[in-house]
Image (cartoon, rainbow, N blue to C red):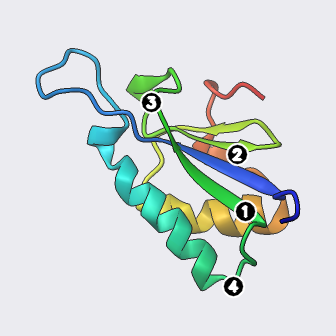
Amino acid sequence: MPKPKYHILVCTNSRPPGHPKPSCGSAGAAQLLMAFNMGLMQRGTPPGEVLVSATGCLGPCELGPTVVVYPDNTWYAKVTEADVATILDEHIGKGTPVARLNPDMVWK
């Protein structure tokens, strides 16, 4: 299998109800993971060209769901299902990170 062009990491960490710290899992991360995979299939992305992986906690829990795109090391905050198409079309498709989704918290 060839080396992937991109690797999309989606934080899916969940904490128990009532926990004082928020989590990406409780903010809809599982749906994001599915939306990225479905979006790649709908766009006809060849298998292995872009990988999508669930991760544990990435750190900025209060800004979740958090998504990171490598090898660009671009961090996205508060990603929604509606943002997935934009990330796939702009960042993955054209190589241009989506500025409105990577505010000052982005470490690039």
Element marked by disc 2:
strand
Which amino acid lies under the numbered mark 1 shown in the image of this protein? Val
Q: Nearer the viewer, mark 3 or mark 2?
A: 2
Q: CA distance from mark 1 to mark 3?
A: 24 Å
| Residue 76 image position (x, y, % from top left) | 59, 40
Residue name at image x 84 percent, y 58 percent: 5
Q: Nearer the viewer, residue 107 or 69?
A: 69
Which amino acid lies under the numbered mark 2 shown in the image of this protein? Val
Q: Are marks 1 and 3 in contact (CB under 8 Å)?
A: no
Residue 69's tag is 2
- Between disc 4 and disc 2, whose residue precedes? 4
Q: Nearer the viewer, mark 1 or mark 3?
A: 1
- Between disc 1 and disc 2, whose residue precedes? 1
Q: CA distance from mark 1 to mark 2?
A: 10 Å
Q: CA distance from mark 1 to mark 4?
A: 11 Å
Quadrant of res 94 = bottom right
Q: CA distance from mark 4 to mark 2?
A: 19 Å
- Between disc 1 and disc 3, whose residue precedes? 1
Residue 44's tag is 4
Element marked by disc 1:
strand
Please name the residue that numbered disc 1 is placed on. 50
Residue name at image x 44 percent, y 64 percent: 34
Neighbor class of circle 4 (other Cα within 10 Å; few <14, some 14-19, many 20+) is: few
| Residue 21 image position (x, y, % from top left) | 28, 18
Please name the residue that numbered disc 3 is placed on. 63
Element marked by disc 4:
loop
